[in-house]
């Protein structure tokens, strides 16, 4: 496809993309991908699609306080875009966004991207030190922040003379907007809802997505306007298959690409609506709200589904028809627990911040127990050895992926590790069976080599989760002079379960009975909680450090 001139006059991100020889091989094999125009503003395209399909007056963004139709949301986004232009921002400037999932946060994100600016959404629980690292890397020209989360951001911005006076506009101010005349909502009230979206090129940058930190220091993944729409035309079209009648809800933050896709971009593509709660999700609250709101699609991580299962069994799940699990490996024990409680076969998938969203998955009617699924239409995937040579079916190796989205880190030497010979390497060990299904083994750095045996930590975790005393667990290798490594299990017990030597033996015997004997955890440590990212992913690098420190 012929390029279109960039509309982004600020070239900061463009100039810090990886060298072209380190880019992934971008594939646009599907007809719907080939039809994407060279001039493309993703937000304008999504609104136009919804309205062209007759959804202008259908609900789009819902909360307990208000519901906006697609037409009303577009008007609000246009007003926010006017406010941003009033700050003197230029296309290509970065705008930091800080907020939990809410209608206001969704509108702010859409306003930024429609304006040709680059959205840098940050997790709500980040502290000032973490925010400063993002600010230093992204160098935003302005910030939009939920009024309740401003303190840490102000502390981060004040630490550098370059950002101490950065324009900061607060949102979700409610009644306080009366006394905060420079809040985003107050300013938007006095602007026009008529504006021409920035005429961005499809290759112009829409967002910087900072990785969630499961493998160490965060990296900034760059995604274009084309990437956003290409992601809509793959997994959502061919696997999820949402409709305009769907009501979507879930726990992943909009600052996480799993949440951004599932709870904003993909519903827009389908003409569906999204519900954002006014209270923090707990497993019981989510199940109750699914019934109260009439939600039909839910996104969350396996751990949360496991905790939701008893409430789903007790309270029912209303109109829910699709349960999407991603963010970490889905143990079959959790899949079966949720299915028994809800009657719904989980829609599993694996994606990556660097790829924007899911690239291996299976619709519920095509689920194969023990496997995540098959490659999503539009993507290619294979299992390779350390030299990049494709392995025969059934052998464990590194997962390599390519498609219409791919890794482009902002100014980061780790690009050369993630992209090799045009293929993306998300860092997962898989095998592909004879039917083409991909079976997750572990993160490639989660493989435990003990006395010459290769053991995948998540396999042991899945086994331990089958024991009735176990609520959560994380399994890593601990350095050991005799065996190289020993298998160490950090276990959170269910309430009332004794954390004693008899329990350790019971868990070890359980694994020995279910798996090859060499896979049992030689050490079991009981803990109150496991280290997780804000999105619910288990931070195995933190567990590995704990194990190393105790060696």
Image (tube, rainbow, N blue to C red):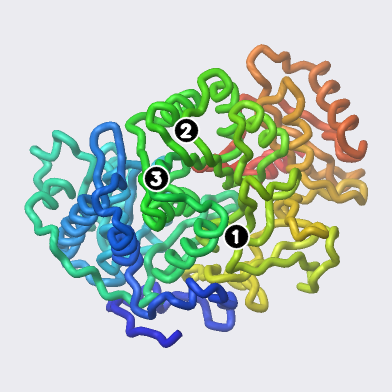
Which residue lies under the disc numbered 1? 359
425 to 101, vertically: above or below:
below
Q: Is residue 444 left or right of residue 130?
A: right
Where the C terminus falls, by quadrant?
top right
Q: CA distance from mark 3 to mark 1?
A: 25 Å
Q: Residue 235, located in which quarter of the rendered image?
A: bottom right
> Which residue sits at x=33%, y=84%?
5
Label 2 – label 1 distance at C-alpha: 27 Å
3 and 2 marks in contact (CB < 8 Å): no
Q: 125 or 399, which lies in front?
A: 399
Of the residues tagged 2 and 1, which is closer to the observer? 2
Which of discs 3 and 1 lies nearer the camera? The answer is 3
Q: Position of residue 140 (x, y in %)?
A: 31, 62
Q: In the structure shown, which secondary structural element does the residue marked by tag 1 occupy?
A: strand
- The quarter of the displayed image where residue 519 is located: top right
Element on which disc 2 rests? loop
Q: Is residue 409 above or below residue 453?
A: below
- Percent across and percent down for residue 217 are 54, 55
**Mark carried by residue 245:** 3
Left/right of residue 106 with respect to residue 85 in the rendered view: right
Query: Residue beneath label 2, please?
Result: 319
């Amino acid at each position: 496809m012929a390029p279109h001139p960039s509309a982004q006059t600020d070239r900061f991100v463009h100039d810090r993309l990886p060298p072209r020889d380190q880019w992934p091989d971008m594939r646009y094999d599907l007809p719907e991908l080939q039809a994407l125009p060279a001039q493309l503003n993703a937000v304008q395209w999504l609104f136009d699609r919804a309205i062209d399909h007759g959804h202008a007056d259908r609900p789009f963004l819902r909360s307990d306080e208000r519901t906006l139709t697609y037409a009303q949301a577009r008007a609000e986004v246009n007003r926010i875009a006017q406010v941003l232009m009033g700050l003197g921002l230029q296309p290509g400037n970065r705008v930091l966004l800080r907020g939990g999932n809410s209608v206001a946060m969704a509108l702010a994100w859409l306003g930024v991207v429609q304006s040709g600016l680059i959205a840098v959404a940050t997790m709500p629980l980040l502290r000032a030190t973490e925010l400063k690292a993002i600010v230093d890397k992204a160098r935003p020209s302005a910030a939009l922040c939920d009024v309740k989360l401003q303190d840490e951001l102000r502390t981060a911005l004040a630490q550098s003379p370059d950002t101490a006076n950065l324009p900061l506009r607060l949102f979700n101010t409610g009644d306080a907007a009366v006394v905060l005349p420079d809040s985003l909502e107050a300013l938007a009230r006095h602007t026009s809802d008529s504006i021409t979206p920035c005429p961005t090129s499809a290759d112009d940058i829409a967002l910087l997505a900072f990785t969630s930190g499961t493998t160490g220091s965060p990296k900034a993944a760059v995604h274009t306007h084309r990437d956003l729409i290409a992601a809509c035309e793959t997994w959502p079209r061919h696997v999820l298959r949402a409709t305009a009648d769907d009501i979507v809800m879930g726990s992943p933050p909009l600052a996480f690409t799993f949440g951004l896709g599932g709870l904003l971009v993909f519903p827009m593509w389908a003409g569906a609506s999204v519900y954002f709660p006014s209270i923090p999700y707990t497993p019981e609250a989510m199940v109750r709200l699914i019934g109260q709101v009439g939600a039909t699609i839910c996104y969350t991580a396996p751990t949360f589904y496991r905790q939701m299962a008893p409430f789903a069994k007790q309270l029912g799940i209303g109109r829910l028809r699709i349960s999407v699990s991603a963010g970490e490996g889905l143990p079959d024990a959790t899949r079966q627990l949720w299915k028994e409680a809800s009657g719904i076969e989980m829609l599993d998938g694996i994606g990556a911040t660097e790829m924007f969203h899911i690239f291996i998955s299976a619709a519920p009617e095509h689920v194969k127990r023990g496997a995540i699924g098959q490659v999503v239409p539009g993507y290619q995937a294979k299992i390779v050895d350390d030299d990049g040579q494709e392995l025969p079916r059934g052998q464990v190796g590194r997962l390599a992926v390519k498609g219409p989205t791919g890794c482009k880190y902002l100014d980061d030497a780790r690009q050369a590790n993630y992209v090799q010979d045009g293929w993306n390497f998300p860092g997962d060990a898989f095998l592909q069976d004879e039917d083409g299904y991909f079976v997750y083994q572990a993160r490639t750095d989660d493989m435990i080599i003990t006395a010459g045996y290769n053991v995948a930590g998540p396999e042991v975790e899945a086994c331990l989760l089958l024991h009735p005393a176990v609520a959560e667990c994380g399994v890593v290798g601990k350095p050991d002079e005799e065996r190289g490594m020993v298998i160490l299990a950090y276990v959170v017990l269910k309430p009332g379960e004794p954390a004693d030597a008899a329990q350790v033996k019971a868990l070890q015997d359980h694994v020995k009975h279910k798996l090859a004997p060499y896979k049992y955890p030689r050490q079991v440590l009981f803990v109150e909680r496991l280290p997780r990212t804000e999105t619910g992913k288990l931070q195995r690098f933190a567990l590995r450090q704990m194990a190393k420190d105790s060696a």
